[in-house]
Amino acid sequence: MALNSTAASDNLPPLRKFIARFGPFLAAGTLLLAFVFLYLNTRNPQRPKAYYTEDDGKSWFITDVAIPPIMHNGHECPRVIMYSCDGGKTLFPGYLMRYTPEAKPKVEEELKRGSPLTQEGMEVKRVGDSEWAGAFDPRKLNASNAKQMIFGGGRKKFDEIIHPKCPDGKPVAEHNPT
């Protein structure tokens, strides 16, 4: 004896009835939502941002992260590392950073290969300073400059610049644009 399909479906629990009746629509809707989600997340991916300055840190602007210096409005612009002492309410430029013209293409190539960012060829200075301090480069170390590079300048000055402090002596918090 053949069962009536309507009578058989009347004995199913309510959720099973719902799935049996609307299952194809639920599957199509789920697939549509997945495609919309993928489309929205891949068509305009968020690129990391950074602060740069064209007037020695007096003002700054935000743009996509790139190896500094970058060209902007006809100016060579170093990156400005911004800090806060009050949880981000007030920002101040901690220091400016750039790579030497010789080092910049090498660093860009290393990053393309997936290598971490290096301090080789990096130079930093405080806002208003006239001289840039380079990171310690052991290849430039020789008998005549060893004491100066290690104790009087070079790495020591570089480290002092890249570790600013709040006026009250508390540690600063680096601030990155969102």
Image (tube, rainbow, N blue to C red):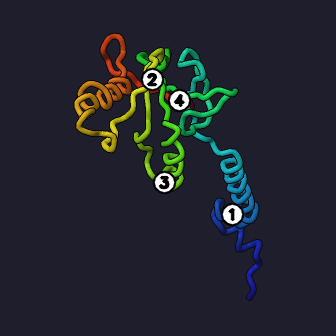
**Residue most toward the front?**
144
In terms of depth relative to the viewer, which is nearer, 96 or 89? 96
Q: Is residue 168 left or right of residue 96?
A: left
Q: Is disc 3 placed on a helix, strand or loop?
A: loop
The tag on residue 19 is 1
Q: In this view, does 74 lie to the left or right of 49?
A: right
> What separation in Å lies between label 1 and label 4 (alpha carbons)?
57 Å
The tag on residue 114 is 3
Amino acid carrying label 4: it is Arg
Q: Residue at x 44, y 36 (%)?
A: 122
> What separation in Å lies between label 4 and label 2 (alpha carbons)?
8 Å
Q: Would you name the residue on which mark 4 appears?
A: 79
For marks 2 and 3, the one nearer the N-term is 2
Amino acid carrying label 3: it is Gly
In terms of depth relative to the viewer, which is nearer, 139 or 21? 139
Q: Is disc 1 placed on a helix, strand or loop?
A: helix
Q: Is residue 36 left or right of residue 59?
A: right
Q: Is disc 2 placed on a helix, strand or loop?
A: strand
Amino acid carrying label 1: it is Ile
Which of discs 3 and 1 lies nearer the camera? The answer is 3
